[in-house]
Amino acid sequence: MTEIIGVRFKNAGKTYFFSPGGVKLSQGDRVVVETARGIECGSVVIPNRMMEDGQIVAPLKGIIRVAGEQDLKVVEENAAKEKEAFRVCQQKIAARGLDMHLVDVEYTFDGNKILFYFTADGRVDFRELVKDLAGIFRTRIELRQIGVRDESKMLGGLGICGRPFCCSTFLGDFQPVSIKMAKEQNLSLNPTKISGTCGRLMCCLKYEQAAYEDLLRTTPRAGSPVLTPDGPGVVTEVALLPGLLKVQLESDPDAAPSVYPRDAVKWGRDLARGRRARDKGDGEKGKGKAGSEK
């Protein structure tokens, strides 16, 4: 077991683990740490706790210090510099006639690097743009091309539900979402109904998928043979969440389908066992009848 804290550098960014070094920290505290990008200032989102060694990547780096007033002042100054760098970069992109859309600018805490995030339909030759920016800001320049989901995460906005984007408020990492999830949840396959503002499938399709998968394992599909309290039949329609089945009974094929709760019918292995028991009972009745005739 190792004592860790979780630190996040953006509002809805990925959480990274660090060693507190014996310092007791609370959620919301600001700390200065060393990362692969250099010295950074982040917020504690997971206070001191013990974690299994197999759940962390060794070696675990420690914090440099708890952020003081001077450190927080540097963060504010960097935020102001980012706005100016964004304006300058947009001007240079227009002057170069580059087919790219600038999304965000980020200064590292120590000011040794400026990262420019952009989107583009294809590959962009931005070598001359890097030279222009390096000549103006006199520091290391890095341009990163990102996808539309990352753009939505950075910019934020309101989804079709009326709430702020999940990706820009609490989702640390994007989860894989597939059209299969929409089908299993019986949603409309109209792209405008199941796609987010970014144009990709909505992240919230993932939230209830585990519950749907569990229900699908315990619920017969449409077209499955079942055994109801009123006799055998075939499922014609399924309401997965309330657990209701419409069944066309074999005894009355011309009648409207009857509705049964999921737990009131037998299907699959239970149906096979029920049929074997019924056949065995009929066989024993037949033998008893034949013996009585003798």
Image (spheres, rainbow, N blue to C red):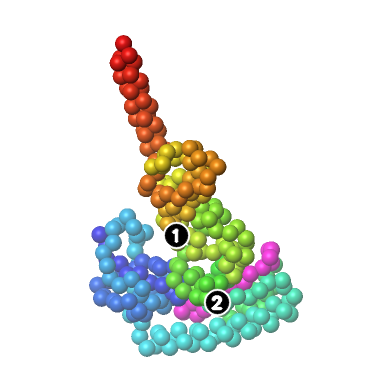
The amino acid on which the numbered mark 2 sits, given as a three-letter code, is: Gly
For the C terminus, the quadrant is top left
Image x and y of residue 153, in percent: 53, 71
Q: Which mark is residue 157?
A: 2
Image x and y of residue 273, in percent: 36, 33
Is residue 92 in view? yes
Of circles 2 and 1, which is in front? 1
Depth check: give the residue in front, 30 or 187: 187
Residue name at image x 26 percent, y 75 percent = 23
Residue, far front = 293
Residue, far top = 294
Q: Can you say whether 180 is above or below 266 in the image?
A: below
Mark 2 or mark 1: whose residue is earlier in sequence:
2
Depth check: give the residue in front, 186 or 256: 256
Is residue 213 in view? no
Q: Which mark is residue 109?
A: none
Disc 1 on helix, strand or loop?
loop
- Disc tally is 2
| Magenta stretch, residue numbers | 107-124
Depth check: give the residue in front, 204 or 141: 204
Residue name at image x 28 percent, y 71 percent = 48
Q: Can you say whether 40 is above or below 187 in the image?
A: below
Q: Which residue is mark 1?
A: 208
Image x and y of residue 283, in percent: 36, 22
Side of 212 relative to 291 (left or right): right
Q: Can you say whether 12 is above or below 212 in the image?
A: below
